[in-house]
Amino acid sequence: MSYPFDEAAFSRRDLLKQGAAALVGGGVAFAQAPAVITGWKPATAGRRFRAVVRYRSSFDVQELTLNPIEPRQIVARVQAAQACYTMVGALNTAQPVMNPAVFGHGAVAVVEEVGPLVKRVQPGDRVLVVVTGQCGQCFQCLRGRSANCQAGFNRPPVMVGRMADGTNVNGNLGGFSELIVAWEEMVVPIASRHDAAELSNLTCVAMTGLGMTMVREPVEAGSSVVVFGAGPIGLAAVQGARLQGAAQIVAIDPIAYRRDLARTVGATDVLNPNDFENGAALIARLRQMTSWVPDRPFAGGRNPMASGPDYIIEAVGGERFVPKTERYAREPHGLEVLQSVFTLCPAGGVMRTCGVGYPMGSTVTFPAGGWSNGTKDHAGGNLAGVQPMRDLPRWARLFETGKFDGKALVGVAVPLDRWREAVEAAAYRTAITGIVTFT
Ligand SMILES: [Zn+2]
Ligand SMILES: [Zn+2]
């Protein structure tokens, strides 16, 4: 365990050593006091279940034997799990994986058993196992930044089960599995009977899109919003903007069916970036579309510095597989778009970004004065502002009441044996999402 603390200041190292001792055997995620548990034996241990496992160069469904859960873990029966773009790199099995892991990025599930220290849920509860949890106790959670919850920091891996040869398999977030085991802080109870495939998007992509429009910098009623990218995150952002009462929502995507979906879920205008000679021409068009009475700033119009959309949402990301659909061929790695977000943003505007560009480590540059003094508010990060325990139950209600169109975000839904189709749909953008469902 190593922390960048000033060890000379006082003996944190000794304190941490004590904390580390608490981790041994107890499986407690933080350096919390170890609990003494007597007379408890997990009833679910030894159950057989099927899961998609990556190990060495093999990547397919395997039968596993469930390990005993830890006192602060839960085990749940998965109902649906989505495949997001973050996961698609795994299709490149040329890089062998030496530590076997269950594949996935969260799940909708029904709790079957809880350890004796779990307070948040009980057997029978329907839950979302989410990509970023909320422990409620760490520094980031206490200051309202649960998207940066530190519960994942130094948490032991979730050794969900064993393969036929006895090798342990890490099941952290692995939703492509009949059973999922999770630490309590990664689990959000939702009292909802809504369709599992639809809700599975809330564990990652829909949570991101709604987070970018409804929390930290919430879209104001009557405002104008530009959304780059009409994938599942962008379409959730369009819906978040619509729910907040945006007057104008412009969605930009090279893929025709995604532009159609954007209109279906609330975009007032859609643009194909391939219709523009270059990024500058697209920016000029967007600025013109979202500025009102430019020569009358006193009457709600915009002077040139303030000309453009009130909110800009970036949900493009970097291309890791060439889409089997239309493609933004000029710069398919999301870097031009990140640059465009900054250029397009007017004084007083808000920028929300979540794409990391590709290849990893790429850079974009901004004018020093504009970055420092341009009064462009930027909140980066997939989930900035989201507090899963607060937001996900009420966002599930938006699905239930039809205010959020969850059906539009379900592309390919397949059983576990056809899991690869779900991932390929995400990788090649042939469907809006790929979801594995369980009966
Ligand atoms: Zn994800
Ligand atoms: Zn936390």
Image: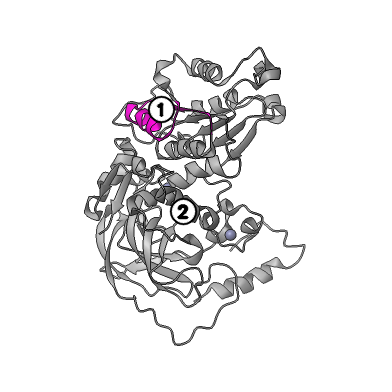
Q: Position of residue 216 (x, y in %)?
A: 60, 44
Verify whether residue 395 appears in magenta: no
Crowd class of label 2 (few under 14; some 14 to 19; many from 20; radius 10 Å)? many
Q: Which disc, if any, is residue 253?
A: 1
Marks 1,2: beta carbons within 8 A: no
Relative to the observer, which residue lies in front, 422 or 30? 422
Q: Residue at x 50, y 27 (%)?
A: 337
Quadrant of res 244: top right
Task: Give the side of residue 419 with respect to residue 320, left or right.
Answer: left
Quadrant of res 12: bottom right
Please, what is the three-letter code of the amino acid marked with disc 1? Asp
Quick one: quadrant of the N terminus? Answer: bottom right
- Under circle 1, the secondary element is loop
> Tag 2 or tag 1, which sits nearer the N-term?
2
- Under circle 2, the secondary element is loop
Q: Position of residue 29 (x, y in %)?
A: 53, 67
Q: Is mark 2 within 8 Å of ligand 1?
A: yes
Q: Which disc, if any, is residue 394?
A: none
